[in-house]
Image (cartoon, rainbow, N blue to C red):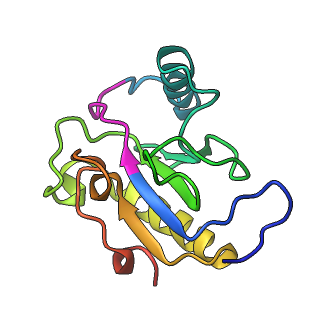
Amino acid sequence: MIYQGPRHHLVDEVILHCSATRPSWWANKSLEEQVAEFRRWHVEDRGWRDIGYHFIVGRAGKILRGRAETVVGAHTKGKNRGTLGVCLVGGHGSSEKDDFFDNFTKEQLWSTRWLVQNIAKRTDLKKVSGHNQYAAKACPGFQVRTEDWVK
């Protein structure tokens, strides 16, 4: 793994998640407002110190930072060290066998690919996985294979 400086944790995996919200959820709100709500859910409802994800990808493809990359996430039980959590807005009612486009937009695909490839350029990224590979969940709502995300 590549040393990223003081207070950074070493990253070699990205884990993809979904927010499990409907496509129309808060559609009239900005991604900043949506992320603030996710942060509230994590901090107030779950008692975490911050949002669990490092990045959130909105339905229009906009990417916002969540938890600082320098801080270990709270997104996948037992797999937070050495990983960055990326959450795609949407995915309510999804199945782990769904096609990406059953629950997400082409803008989310492009932005998430760009983000993962950017992470790969500055870390020793070896794997991209889905939350469903580590927990009995449908999240992120499709099957994740590293080769689909890192070229």
Q: Is residue 58 above or below residue 130?
A: above
Residue at 23% x, 35% y: name it: 92
Quarter occupied by the N terminus:
bottom right
Q: Percent from the top left, x then y, of residue 129? A: 37, 64
Q: Is residue 63 above or below residue 33?
A: below
Q: Percent from the top left, x then y, of residue 95? A: 15, 48
Snapshot quadrant of residue 121: bottom right
The answer to whether any part of residue 60 appears in the image is: no
Snapshot quadrant of residue 10: bottom right
127 or 24: nearer the viewer: 127
Residue at 61% x, 40% y: name it: 66
Q: Is residue 43 above or below residue 7?
A: above
Residue 24 in the magenta stretch? The answer is: yes
17 or 109: nearer the viewer: 17
75 or 40: nearer the viewer: 75
Residue at 51% x, 67% y: name it: 13
Magenta residues (range): 17-25
- Residue ranking furthest to the right: 6
- Residue ranking furthest to the bottom: 151
The answer to whether any part of residue 82 appears in the image is: yes
Would residue 6 be found to the left or right of residue 24 on screen? Answer: right
Snapshot quadrant of residue 32: top right
Would residue 151 be found to the left or right of residue 129 on screen? Answer: right
Residue 109 in the magenta stretch? The answer is: no
Residue at 44% x, 58% y: name it: 15
Would residue 93 be found to the left or right of residue 67 on screen? Answer: left
- Residue ranking furthest to the top: 44
Would residue 70 be found to the left or right of residue 121 on screen? Answer: right
Q: Percent from the top left, x then y, of residue 96? A: 18, 53
Q: Percent from the top left, x then y, of residue 124? A: 62, 78
